[in-house]
Image: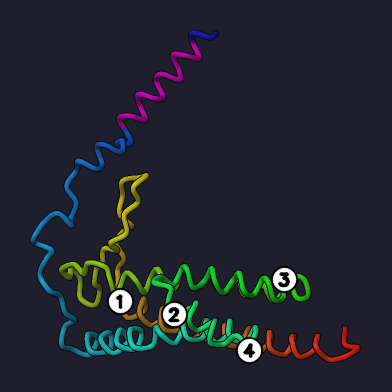
Amino acid sequence: MRAARHSERTRKKVIEAVSFPGRAERMAKPHLVDTFDNALFQHFNRDLVGDEMAHLLSRITMNWGKVEHALYLSMKSIDRKRAYSWRAAFFSSTTLAKRKDQARKSLREAVGRSYPKLLDAFDDALNDLQDVQHRRNALSHGLWLPIQRAGEYPVQPLRYDKTKALFDPILIVDIAFLGDLLDNMTTLTNRIYSIGSELLAHQQLINVPGAR
């Protein structure tokens, strides 16, 4: 029985080795980022669809700072006496990830015990922000590839997983992709503003004598 089980495990390992290339093999295999064929500058077609996509992308690019600004204002409302400290801590961070960690830490210190539901809502908003940020970063920092079908633009995100030796999968960007991203950005910004307003109202309530 042991020999049979050992033989079966060995057979599975052989099949897996043949079916799924290992990390070293994936690293050695050429990738589309390795060729000058994809180094050419890309652009939207000059037609109704291309013009609309260019307009949507410009709105996404121009208004991304609004999302980060909303996050800052929500954090600032935690303690207005320390507004300048919040500003320095928030905008001196070089990455949005650090800013989110700072905001999460500050909010947890302020209302972690008195209003845990608000902290949960803020965590949910930050998780959604991660998804929105990933899509936006692909547009701003990804490699736009030659168009294959009208109205559909392939973009290779330049994010590399060292463990798996893989890039993130290619995104197909069309009007729907850009429209959804802009809608998600708008909704998320409003949610963050709403959380900041609710936080301010909560702090005012708990500071009222006899309110607790």
Visible in this render: residue 191? no
Instruction: Report the mark closest to the observer, 2 or 4.
Output: 4
Q: Of marks 1 and 3, which one's residue comes earlier in the chain? A: 3
State which quadrant residue 48 falls in: bottom left
Where 124 falls versus 46 (above or below)?
above
Q: Distance between the residues labelled 1 and 3?
A: 41 Å
- Amino acid carrying label 3: it is Gly
Residue range highlighted in magenta: 4-18
Q: Distance between the residues labelled 2 and 1?
A: 32 Å
Q: How far apart are marks 2 and 4 (CA)?
A: 17 Å
Q: Quadrant of the N terminus?
A: top right
For label 3, the SS is loop
> Measuring 31% from the left and 65% from the top, which residue is drawn there?
171
| Residue 74 in the image, given as x and y percentages of width and height | 58, 84
Can you tell which mark lies on residue 81?
4
> Measuring 41% from the left and 78% from the top, which residue is drawn there?
181
Q: Is residue 17 covered in magenta?
A: yes
Q: In this view, does 174 lie to the left or right of 185?
A: left
Q: Is residue 100 covered in magenta?
A: no
Instruction: Report the mark closest to the observer, 3 or 4.
Output: 4
| Residue 92 in the image, given as x and y percentages of width and height | 42, 77
Residue denoted by label 1: 174
